[in-house]
Amino acid sequence: MEHKNIWTKYNAAQVAEIMSYNDGYKAYISECKTERECVARAVQDAEAHGYLDLKEIIREGKTVKAGDKVYFNNMGKALVLFHVGTEELEKGMKILGAHIDSPRMDLKQNPLYEDTELAFLDTHYYGGIKKYQWVTLPLALHGVVVKKDGTTINLVIGESEDDPVVGITDLLPHLAGAQMDKKAGKVIEGEDLNLLIGSIPLEGEEKDAVKANILKWLKDTYDMEEEDFLSAEIEAVPAGRAKDYGVDRSMIIGYGQDDRVCAYTSYTALFEVENPDRTNVCLLVDKEEIGSQGATGMCSQFFENAVAELMNCMGTYSELKVRRAMQNSVMFSSDVSAAFDPIYPTVNEKKNAAYLNRGISFNKYTGLRGKSGSNDANPEFIARIRAALEKHQVSYQMTELGKVDEGGGGTIAKYMAVYNMEVIDSGVPVLSMHSPWEVVSKADVYEAKQGYVAFLKEM
Ligand code: MN
Ligand code: MN
């Protein structure tokens, strides 16, 4: 199979379009660093495109008809966008799914302590990380604190130019002899991922005066007490904006591109396609990085419930029809793939690796140790996808994560396959995946969006 670097296929106008689309994407990943921020942004963008809140429609007893656009917000951490088609819902939907949670460090529920006149916030990391990559970086805090009276404090510290940042310190090389002899997984221990957040003691305070000063700052700034951390969800993430990467500006470096690159490309593709035949759907879910459990993850029934609610608003609800709607659907379970890295060639089998600048990648299957735990897409389905992509001149590659028995992973695909729908893993190749600063190709980002448009138009 011949593969070309896809940059060679574009004319100047197309390159300009790719750069401009990626500017929008860069802004999105710079400003949306938690699942909640991703949902809030998608809702805002959806409303600007004419989407209405399905819950409001239900409350007001209104109806939904072909051509309408509605969204279902699940706890502010997962979202479904429906662009209702002219065909009956039971004929199935075309679903673009992606996850909006990313690896990070979450504050513990009792996080604040002082040691040797330094104040720290204790964390519990979320998702698969190489812990040694997360020290000595400027980190920002994003999240919510919900007080007993129900008021929610939305908090972002460390993103504005003049904002302070926090971070995790590391040993100097001069004293790191014993540390450097440890295995990489033990060099930095999970329990040592403690964020240094202050060092000035509160005047007149005898014990834990630095912590007391932080508490005073929290009270003055957010009107919060130490106990309010009990009902808070605060994530420590790399501080700062995504940037062009490479002197030719062909790539983007940014935090959380797994899997917000697929989220952004999916929902912007949804906005681009008008007059759908079958209902077009974009599904943005939480908790993928920790196994998709939980009410806002793909294992939750919220999507199925949202479909039932939508059908009810259209006056055609029945249990059987909901089942048919799910079973007759087709889905791109979009998640990033590891891009081949020539510095580490031994983990991949070259014929079947995903490469930067070869377009949207498809994994027929994922899993590990003999495809275990994987959805395995049907060739009949893949053939239709090939035809759709080629009709729209989308560049794509058919790939695997790594060498057989090298490792592996799972996605949300298998949880949707439960409904007996056709589903395949697709996405954008990423370098330094799951690191604080991941790298993608702008051309691949653009081809992914084009691939999603082709899927919605042709399948
Ligand atoms: Mn992912
Ligand atoms: Mn991941």
Image (cartoon, rainbow, N blue to C red):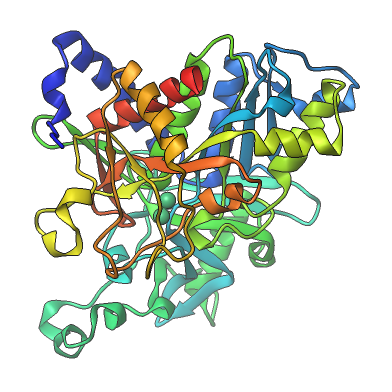
Task: Specify the farthest residue to the front.
Answer: 380
Task: Give the percent coordinates (x, y) of residue 329.
Answer: 61, 33
Q: Residue at x 69, y 67 (%)?
A: 227
Image: 253 above or below 193: above
* Residue at x 45% of width, y 58% of height: 410
Q: Position of residue 387 (x, y in %)?
A: 37, 24
Quadrant housing residue 189:
bottom left
105 horizontally vs 392: left or right: right
- Position of 423 compared to 169: left or right? right
Q: Using the rendered view, name the quadrant where residue 229 is placed.
A: bottom right
Closer to the camera in the image, 247 or 199: 247
Q: Which residue of the protein is positioned furthest toward the right in this rendering?
A: 61
In the displayed structure, 50 sits above or below 72; it is above
Q: Residue furthest bottom?
A: 178
> Looking at the image, which is closer to me, 217 or 277?
277
Q: Position of residue 130 (x, y in %)?
A: 31, 68
User: Where does the image place residue 237, in percent across and percent down from the top left?
Assistant: 41, 54
Report the label total.
Answer: 0
Query: Does residue 286 lie above or below 358 as drawn?
Result: below
Q: Is 176 left, or right, of 28 in this rendering?
A: left
Picture quarter with the N terminus: top left
Q: Is residue 24 visible?
A: no
Q: 112 and 353: which one is in front? A: 353
Question: Quick check: 340 left or right of 111?
Answer: left
Which residue is pictured at 35% across the width and 29% down the height? Answer: 386
- Asked whether residue 314 is in view, the answer is yes
